[in-house]
Amino acid sequence: MHFGRALRTAGLPVGPGKVLAAAEAVQAVGIANRGDFYWALHAVFVNRRDQRELFDQAFHIFWRNPQLLEKMMGLLLPELRSPDAPQAEEINRRLAEALHPGTGDGPEDRPQEKEVDLDAAMTFSDRELLQRMDFEQMSAEEVARAKQLIRRMTLPLMDVPTRRFQADPRGARADMRATLRAALRSGGLIALKRKSRRTRPPPLVILCDISGSMSRYSRLFLHFMHAVTNDRDRVYTFLFGTRLTNVTRFLRYRDVDVALDKVAGVVEDWSGGTRIGQCLGEFNRRWSRRVLAQGAVVLFITDGLDRDAGAGLGREMDRLHKSSRRLIWLNPLLRYEGFAPKSLGMRAILPYVDEFRPVHNLESLGELVRALSRPAPRRLDAAAAWRERGEAA
């Protein structure tokens, strides 16, 4: 019961029914074998692939794996790290707060103070801190607040002219067909009708990496994709790891929990390896002509770490770049000051993107929204700038 309560506090959907089912599973397999005990609880409490890492850490810490317990205690003690010391494996902050609730920063852990009226004109709120906090470092409460802010985001894509025209009394072109129809109705009197091009936001295509290296970010990216999909039309979302999965239809559910459950049920390569070139090749063959029509804007979300060492990636990126109006690469690794595209996958991607942006917190998502509402830079200028940056790196 206490273990289920810790999992629920850490963010897993654990209710009384699952606790009872876990007790029955343990009675069936016994507690003589630690492996059987682990997998019995795993079968009950874990429903999605993105929950495996949290459950695994919680199990070994709660049931006293000495190595992970030492890491957990080190997380709770003051941190004194040598610059030359190796960086230890990071333990989920939500799990730390769930197992040691008295050590958090929540309002229940702070001493009660008297209410004092202050002039907050020259101060900042915790919401501003949340905007700049890395998704990887957020607690369960902060993740919930971030999801609420993402749900209220809107994506004002810049309108672009289409091939169709609409009636406009001040249009630059004369509409001879409408003019002749009006002349027939009026008995010969001619009133010149005019028309102008119709404008419409371009389609938006999102290609998101859900491999193991991106698992800490893809969960919140899915909330962003759900908010964008329900905010406008012609939004197409694809997830890829070792294979490509079209999840556009599932993200159109209004309820975000139902949508993400549907997505988790259809995606089979969650938190696995990454084959970017192979997945892009499948996208270009099967989906490119369907979703990239009318000059679509493509958001390519990945860290660029490819299992196949960039095999065939440059050719597929070139084709994707030529088929889209604007190709934006969103990489969470770009938040580091000393970042350089040294891997073969990154070097294969970089020459074919129009913009290269970090995406690791709410502030970066807000910058992306503002960038999409502005006119795009000329392709030749953008390509030359990123090529020079790649050669310098």
Image: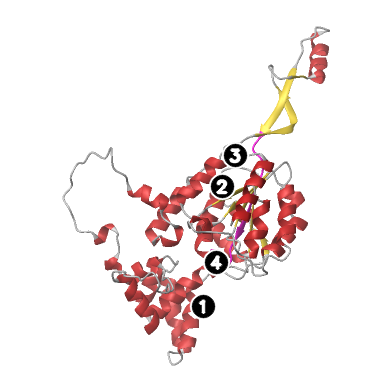
Q: Is residue 48 visible?
A: no
* Mark number displayed over residue 43: 1
Secondary structure under badge 2? Answer: helix
Residue identifier under label 4: 213
Mark 4 belongs to which amino acid? Ser
Residue 228: image location, x then y, percent:
56, 47
In-image side of 87 versus 110 (left or right): right
Query: Gap in Å between the C-alphas at discs 3 and 4?
Result: 29 Å
Label located before the other in sequence (3 or 2)? 3
| Above-or-below relation of 61 to 107 | below
Kindly check if marks 3 and 1 are in contact, taking CB atoms under 8 A apart as contact: no
Residue 1: image location, x then y, percent:
36, 76
In the picture as drawn, the residue positioned furthest to the front comes out as 392
Mark 2 belongs to which amino acid? Val
Mark 1 belongs to which amino acid? Ala
Residue identifier under label 3: 157
- Callout 3: few (<14), some (14-19), or many (20+) C-alpha neighbours within 10 Å? many
Label located before the other in sequence (4 or 1)? 1
Secondary structure under badge 1? Answer: helix
Foreground mark, 3 or 1?
3
In-image side of 290 versus 145 (left or right): right
* Mark number displayed over residue 83: none
Residue identifier under label 2: 228
Give the quarter of the figure containing the C terminus: bottom right
Query: Gap in Å between the C-alphas at discs 3 and 1?
Result: 43 Å
Range drawn in magenta: 200-214
